[in-house]
Image: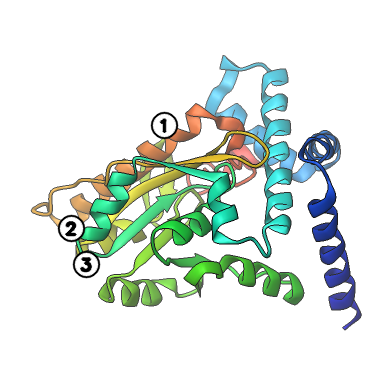
Amino acid sequence: MYKEIIVTTIFKTLYIFSKITPNIVKAFIAKVISKIFIRVHHKYNRVAMSNLNFIFKNNKTDKEKKVMIENMYYNLIQNIGSFIENQNITKNRLLQKVTFVNENIMINALESNRPIIFITAHLSNWEILPLAIASKYTPLVGVGRPLKQPTLDKILKRNREKFGIKMIPKSGAMRGLAKSMKEKKVVGLLIDQNIEGIDVDFFDKKVMHTTSAALLSYKYDAIVIPCFIKRVDTEKYIATFYKPIDVPKNLQLDKYILLHTQKQAKITEEIIKESPEEWLWIHRRWKANYPEIYS
C-alpha cells in the first residue's frame, strides 16, 4: 500500500515537473543523468561494452564506444521523460511530434484488407511509435511483458493502450497474435531481442531471431512492414515505413521462414547502423550463440 502511494506520488511529481520545465532544461538534465549512468551503472555498462567490442572490435576506440554508451543513456533518459510527459497527450499534440515518411506504404497496406504486422526495434523512442501510428492510421495490437511493480505496470499499460491499442501478455502471445491475424488486425512487434527462434546473420554474427512475424505472414498472408523511428530533437521524431518484406510463398516453409527472418534482421541492422547511439545496446543480443562475450 505504502509503496503504491510513494510510486504514484513520485510519478505525479515528475509529470508536473515535465510540464513546467523548458525543453532545453530537460535536455540538460537528461545529459547530466546519462553522464552519471556511464560512471555508476556497471552492470549495463559491461553488457553494452561487450556488445560494442564484439561488433566493432578495433574499428572504434574505447573512447568512441564510451561516448556511444553515454549517448544511448541520453536517448533512454529522454524516452523516460517523454513517457512521463505524454500520459494525457492528445492525438493532435502527439502528431505534432512525429512526422511519417513513405505513408503510401501504410495506406496501400490498409487498403489491401490483409492483416498487417509492423516490425521495429528498441531504437530511439520506440514507445511513442505505436501511439503515433494508432493516432493517425489504425489501432494496433502489441505484445508486452508486465512490470513487477503493480503501480508502474498499471501506468505503463494505461499509456500503451491509448488510442485503441490493445496489449497482450508476452507469455503465450502467439495465440493472441493468431487471433488478431484472423480478424485482420494490425500488429506491432519488437524483433531485436534474444528471443527463441532461428539463427540468422546480424552485424556479421549469428544471432537468435524470433520467427513470429515470418510464421504469421506465411500462415495468414500478412503484410510485414518494417517501421523505425528516429529522434530529430528532444520532442521531434521521424517515423519511416519501409517496403514490406517480400518472400515467395512457393518456397518450403522452413526456407520461407529463414529467408523472411533474415530480411527482417538485415533491415534492422541497416537502420541501427544509421544511428547506433539510439539503439539499446544493453540487451544480451548475441547470448544464444556467443555467451562467452558476457562472462
Q: Secondary structure at mark 1?
A: helix
In the picture, measured across the screen, residue 154 lies left or right of residue 143, that is right
Q: Secondary structure at mark 3?
A: helix
- Tag of residue 220: 3
Are the two marked residues, 1 and 3, in contact with CB atoms closer than 8 angstroms?
no
Determine the residue positioned at 51% across, 68% down. Answer: 163
Q: x, y (%) of residue 126?
A: 55, 50
In the picture, measured across the screen, residue 33 lies left or right of residue 107, that is right
- Tag of residue 270: 1
In the rendered structure, which amino acid carries the disc numbered 3? Tyr
- Tag of residue 253: 2
Cα distance in 3D space between marks 1 and 3 = 27 Å
Determine the residue positioned at 32% across, 73% down. Answer: 178
**Residue density around tag 2, few if under 14, some if 14–19, many if 20 or more, within 10 Å:** some
Determine the residue positioned at 18% across, 47% down. Answer: 247
Q: Earlier in the sequence, mark 1 or mark 3?
A: 3
In the rendered structure, which amino acid carries the disc numbered 1? Glu
